Amino acid sequence: GLGCPTVRATVVVPTYNERENVPVLVERLRRMLGGLAWEIIVVDDDSPDGTAAVVKDLAALDPRVRCIRRVGRRGLSGACIEGILSSSAPLVAVMDADLQHDERLLPRMFELIESEPLDVVVGSRYAESGGIGNWDASRAAASKFATRLAHLVLKADLKDPMSGFFMIRHDAFLACVRQGISGVGFKILLDLFATSPVPLRYKELPYEFRTRVAGESKLDSNVAWEFF
């Protein structure tokens, strides 16, 4: 009755020190999701570089931009969970702010999940024709190792269970949260598949992982060990 279209898809973006990248990401989403009723929720872990202030400036100009600022709480999975729970949309995408995920996949993800009996569509670096860009050998090896470990706890043959780029039905996500999903760690997708009370129906879409432009990577040598 207020003349606003119901939001169909929310894009949740966890951030820590991404002030330079967030405006670029928002502009790319505007271009890619033009006709769709969408919003972006940036979940910022009180970045010292002022990411939250940048998001608030963007929100003043575009009501589709929202910011959740977390103080005294850190962590990628926890940020994703809080962001998704704050959405009222039936579909939620998760992606990083570092511009390494290809936003051009989002309309296709939306189309697939709307038209097929799917719970999750995953952006995959390891599916046919996907790629990890110009990673150095040690980072690529750590990622492959973590992926192999992931398959030990998975109930699905996901090519890229460590992906941080996916779209999920809100009701499927809620079922996982109520099942007691872990908010600790950095790979929410793996936790969702491992926790879901019923096997998640999924499809993977290949994409090429881009090189980070600004800021610093959240993936350091501790990550594979912490995951293990």
Image (cartoon, helix red, strand yellow):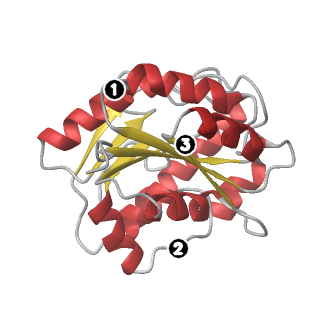
Q: Quadrant of residue 61?
A: top right
**Which sits earlier in the primary sequence, circle 3 or circle 1?**
1
Judging by the rendered image, the residue that carries numbered circle 1 is: 128
Classify mark 2: helix, strand or loop. loop
Q: Which residue is mark 3?
A: 144
As shown in the figure, which amino acid type bears the numbered disc 1?
Glu
Q: Amino acid at mark 2?
A: Ser
Among the two numbered marks 2 and 1 on one chain, the one whose residue lies closer to the N terminus? 1
Residue contact between numbered discs 2 and 1, judged by CB atoms under 8 Å: no
Classify 68 as above or below 210.
below
Categorize mark 1 by other alpha carbons within 10 Å: few (<14), some (14-19), many (20+): few
For image coordinates 30% across by 35% down, the residue present is 109
| Residue 203: numbered disc | none
Read off the residue under disc 2. 182
Give the alpha-carbon distance from disc 3 to disc 1, as whole Å: 15 Å
Q: Position of residue 95 (x, y in %)?
A: 51, 41
From this viewpoint, is residue 170 visible?
yes
Q: How far apart are the two marked residues, 3 and 2, measured between alpha carbons?
A: 22 Å
**Number of dots carrying numbers:** 3
Q: Place residue 151 in its image quadrant.
A: bottom left
Tag 3: amino acid: Lys
Q: Residues within 10 Å of mark 2 (few under 14, many from 20)?
A: some
- From what the image shows, is residue 228 above or below residue 222? below
Answer with the quarter of the image where residue 107 lies: top left
